[in-house]
Amino acid sequence: MKINKELQEAIRFHGHLGPYLVLGLLAGELALKKLGCKKYFGSEVAVWGANKKPKSCIVDGLQLSTGATYGKGNIRKFNAKDIRIVVCDLKNKKKIRLSLKAGLLERLGGLKGHSDSEAFALRLFKSRPQDLFESRL
């Protein structure tokens, strides 16, 4: 299967392909699109529930897709049980709240081994973000 340039760059940055990396990529893209804000300096990102691997891999995807980084101080991570993401447009202060759709976390928990995770990550990457996330402006 051919992997597009964006996903190749994410794999290179993160070190491997996994479903949480892809979820971070898609969540960030969805948030910026819905808010209409610019990548890199136009947003602030907060993520809950990405405390330990593999869930913490979502943060790398969010950094790549939004341009928010720890170095710039426009992404923050908080302890929580469930994954939630809030992206704020710094220009107009509008926010979008994202969470995983019901059943997705269970499917992620049922993956067995790296090859299973990679295959699922590729399927996720082809998905429409609105099919994976609940979103609220």
Image: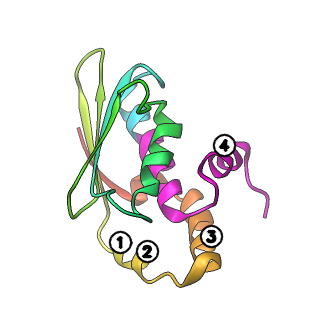
In the picture of the structure, the residue carrying the numbered disc 1 is: 105
For marks 3 and 4, the one nearer the N-term is 4
- Where residue 13 sits in the image (x, y, percent)? 63, 45
Q: Residue at x 52, y 64 (%)?
A: 19
Whether tag 1 and tag 2 are in contact, CB under 8 A, the answer is yes
Q: Is residue 14 magenta?
A: yes
Magenta-colored segment: predominant secondary structure: helix
Toward the viewer: 75 or 25? 75
Q: Which residues are magenta?
A: 1-30
- Where residue 117 sits in the image (x, y, percent)? 57, 73
Q: Residues within 10 Å of mark 1 (few under 14, many from 20)?
A: few
For marks 2 and 4, the one nearer the N-term is 4
In the picture of the structure, the residue carrying the numbered disc 4 is: 6
In the picture of the structure, the residue carrying the numbered disc 3 is: 118
| Quarter of the N terminus within the rendering | bottom right
In the picture of the structure, the residue carrying the numbered disc 2 is: 108
